[in-house]
Amino acid sequence: MNNLIAGDLTLASQPQRVDAIELVWTGKSNDLYPGKHLTPYLQAALSEAAERLVPIEMYFDRLDHFNSSTITLLIQFIQEARQRGVRLVMVYNQAVKWQKMSFNALRVFTKDAWLELRSV
């Protein structure tokens, strides 16, 4: 996977990982329509993960901010990953108030083994 730069947001792929697709989110996801850039990128990650039979690990702990449009996109991504049989791990920093609140809200989707939320 290549890296993605979309405005103030960067998603960096860690190519040395063979046991997972690792995506590190940095900067700010403040686009009102984040799907125009993120959806094709995340769909490609899903396809690669499904083909390689590995999970996708997304690290949000270095992210400065994401808006409600990004939360909506992440919920859609969680549902798509579950339908395609790709396990997701989302890592966040619980010491950062907005991250703790946002990821606590996503806990409703951890009803099975397809999604793990992990704090650092």
Image (cartoon, grey):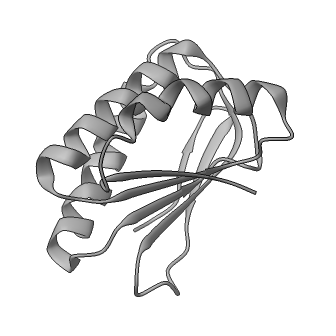
> Is residue 77 placed above or below 87 in the rendered structure?
above
From the viewer's side, name the closer residue of 62 and 118.
Answer: 118
Question: Against 117, is 31 above or below?
Answer: above
* Residue 86 relative to residue 118: left or right: left
Give the residue displayed 72% in from the left and 32% down from the top: 100
Q: Residue furthest right?
A: 95
> In the orientation shown, which residue stands out farthest toward the front?
111
Residue 107: x %, y % from top left: 49, 34
Judge whether residue 66 can be spotted in this image. Answer: yes
Tell me the quadrant of the picture where the N terminus can be found: bottom left
Which residue corresponds to the image point at 41% horizontal and 20% vertical from the top-left? 72
As drawn, is 48 to the left or to the right of 83? right
Can residue 65 be spotted in the picture? no
The spot of residue 2 in percent (x, y) is 45, 65
Q: Can you give x and y, in whole percent of width and height, for residue 75 in the image?
A: 37, 28
Quarter occupied by the C terminus? bottom right
Does 75 sit left or right of 68 as displayed?
left
Residue 16 in percent (x, y) is at: 52, 87
Identity of the residue drawn at 30% across and 74% down: 54
Query: In the rendered image of this protein, does residue 89 appear above or below residue 39?
Result: below
Task: Using the image, determine if residue 46 lies above or below residue 29.
Answer: below
How many numbered tags mark residues here? 0
